[in-house]
Structure formats: C-alpha cells, structure tokens
Image: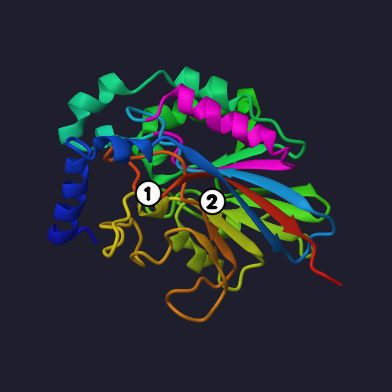
Amino acid sequence: MLTRRRFLALAGVAGLGLVGGAGAVVAQSYPFRINRQQRPLSGLERPLRMVQLSDLHYGPFIHATSVARWVDAALQQAPDVIVITGDLVDAGSRIRWRASANNPLTPDLDLLIAELGRLQAPLGVYSIWGNHDNWAPSAKRYLQERLPEVGIRILNNQGQLLRPDFYLGGVDDFWDGHADVFAALGNYKPGPACVMLAHNPDYLDFFFRRPVDLGICGHTHGGQVFLPHYGAPWTPSWYGATYLGGWYPPGQSPTLPPVLGFVSKGLGMTAVPLRLNAPAEVVVLDLQPLAR
C-alpha cells in the first residue's frame, strides 16, 4: 500500500534526481545486467535455455535505443526460447496529471515492434500482457495485431507444447485483465515440464494444485527504488516487498508460492525515470533435467 509516509519517501528520492544526486541516480537508470540462473526442472529430458525480458515500459522514459540494446543482449545468449512477461508499454497517460506530458513523449509503437521483431529463437518468441498493456487499450490492440506479424505469439490464457518435454503457457494480467490458468493449461497433458508466464507474481497463488512446475513473473521492478535502511517505498503487490525479485521456493505460508517461482526485476521504469539499487536485467534461465 502506498501510504503517505512511503509516498513522501519516494518523492524525496525523485527530488534527488532533480538536484545534486541526479548524476548518480540517472547512472543507475539505463544500464542493465545479464542475470544468469540455473535450476533443475521436473519433466525436462534435456537442457533448456530461456531468456526473459520483462517490464519494458516503452514510452516517455524508454525508447527504441534501449529496446535495441536489450534485444541484442538477448540474442547474444543463444536462447532456445524467449519470453516477454508483460508491460511492453508504459501507460502513464492513464494518470490524469501525467497525461499532458506523457502523450507527446511516447515514441512510435512501430519502432518498438521493429526492435522486438529481431528476436528469434528455435522454439519461438512469446509474450503475455501486463497491467500497463491493459491500461493502454489502443496500444494493446495495435500490438496484438502487429506482434504476430513479426514472429511474437501472445499467450493470453493459452499454452503450447514446444518440445516433447516442455510446455509453455501464459495468462492475462491478474489485476487488470482476466487471468485464467485453467484455459492456459487446456492443451497440457501430464509428463512434460510446464512453465507458466504470469506478469504479476501474486497470481502464483492460483497455481495451487495445478500441474505447473515453474511460474515466471515480473511486475515489481525490484521496487524500482530501493532505499538503504528503508527498502522499497512502494511495491505493487498484495504481499508488500515479498516479490522483489529472484527465486521463490514452494511452501505452505503466505510469503511462499505454492509452486517454484522466479520474478525478474525487469528492464524499464514507470512513474519516475529512475532505478535505484534495483538493477534492470535481462534474465537467462538455464533449466536442467533432474539428476537421475
């Protein structure tokens, strides 16, 4: 919840970006890292390399030059499959006081599509919607029409067997869409590893007693702004700062998902043009068969 205290903390950090601390803050905003992770996964018969891009927030703060660098980095990893876990665009214009400034600064969507169209992988490139995509219905409709033309399939409560040992599904956004894991599992038959894409990690709860081996999410940006000795002033999750990023083992408690989960800190920015102690990342997931 964004309390008055947390709002003032975030506003104070934004103020730093306008005065003496501007150089340090901006320096952390646009660089990104390659976050390499390995994990055994039930159902796999041979290794699988998945590259995850999340929370691009293409808009006033993120333009095609940034997207081009992320695409180059993804291709350099030689992935078997590439996934984009939502928030392709930034919908700041939904906030009335930002609309007048946001709209003129939003770049041409065709430039975004052209860069994403360079993504290629043997098993394909797949995307899901995030809350910002659903907040920008005209942009979403355009992307829904054009992305398949450049080889990107939208998994909106859908799934597909990509290899005899690997099923990939994806759901709509939990908060601002109509997420349906039952529909996404409609083509799944027991045996292969099942990976499910969900923009919001809060939706991991809905994988309870479903045949999902791994849930892959984004949404929280690692807090985007993470203050020393304080933490993230605001995190868009019912669970507060629980899902800031990384691996989450399955467990039986409110702070653990019912299935194995991974949350990316994402790449873009929203609300304010900065990241602080929450590095942007292209994620490389090297998934391995279980040891026999």
- Magenta span includes 88: yes
Tag 2 near tag 1, CB within 8 Å: no
Please tell me the numbered disc located at residue 171.
2
Please tell me which residue lies in front, 222 or 82. 222
- 118 with respect to 173 (left or right): right
- Magenta span includes 204: no
Choose top left, top right, bottom left or bottom right for residue 244.
Answer: bottom left
Percent position of residue 27, x then y = 36, 36
Q: Quadrant of the C terminus?
A: bottom right
Of label 2 and label 1, which has the lower sequence position?
Answer: 2
Q: Quadrant of the N terminus?
A: bottom left
Q: Is residue 121 visible?
A: yes
Residue under label 1, please give it.
176
x 52%, y 30%: residue = 144
Please tell me which residue lies in front, 270 or 158. 270
168 to 230, vertically: above or below: above
The kind of secondary structure element at disc 2 is loop
Choose top left, top right, bottom left or bottom right for residue 207.
Answer: bottom right
